[in-house]
Amino acid sequence: MTVSNNQFYISPKDYLEGELVSPIKHEYRRGHVYAMVGAKKPHIVIASNLIILLGNHFNDSPCLVLTSDIKVRLEEANCYYYPDVVVTCDERDTNSTEDFILYPSLIIEVLSPSTAAFDRGEKFADYQTLSSLREYVLINQSQMSVECFCLSESEGWVSKTYETGDKVYFDSIDFRCDIAAIYRKVPGVGKGDA
């Protein structure tokens, strides 16, 4: 998220209308609009790997695995964000024709140096206002490190970090894979990156 130069309030309706015609994507946070910066190749490869892995996992399921082209509407926080990868199994989302979803169960963000602090802090706090969200995953794009925040009824948000050689488990969707599969073909990081 880049710093907004506008100091005036933009309504969610005006934001959505603007996004329909804008050549670039913007996130919306409490009346302010922020231009999305282009992602680097490792970021894109990781997100693509996840789309394939999770898409295959849900092949025979009504659940949707969506890319960074779909917005998530956070009504309570008054935000619209474009997560890198998002999963929803809620039929209010799967049957909707809107260009945003409201009921994700899993959100994945690939960390960039410019957005990592925001993704870990304020954005995660905003995402926690979603009653449907069960897991938030942060993926480092320069080394094998996947941090999963899973919502536990007894303990709240519990963090688990996976590193090189580990099997990653996304509890919210009962998904397992080798961490190397997430980083496949990531230059300088993934196995088989030639």
Image (cartoon, grey):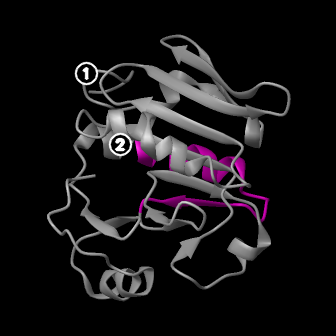
State the extent of the magenta-drawn residues as a range.
45-68
The residue that label 1 is drawn on is 188
Percent of width and height locating residue 20: 35, 86
Front one among 66 and 76 = 76
User: Residue sitting at 23 percent across and 38 percent down?
Assistant: 114
Percent of width and height locating residue 176: 69, 30
User: Residue sitting at 51 percent across and 29 percent down?
Assistant: 181
The dot on residue 45 is: 2
- Look at the numbered disc 1 and give the secondary structure of its residue: loop
- Residue lying farthest to the top in this orientation: 165
To which quarter of the image does residue 117 belong?
top left
Amino acid, disc 1 = Gly
Residue 49 seen:
no
How many numbered discs? 2
| Circles 1 and 2 in contact, beta carbons < 8 Å | no
Query: Viewed as shown, does residue 53 lie left or right of 35?
Result: right
23 drawn magenta: no
In space, the residues marked 1 and 2 are separated at their CA atoms by 12 Å
Front one among 154 and 148 = 154
The C terminus appears in which quarter of the rendering?
A: top left
N-terminal of the pair, mark 1 or mark 2, is 2
**Label 2 neighbourhood size at 10 Å, few (<14), some (14-19), many (20+)?**
some
User: Residue sitting at 79 percent across and 59 percent down?
Assistant: 60
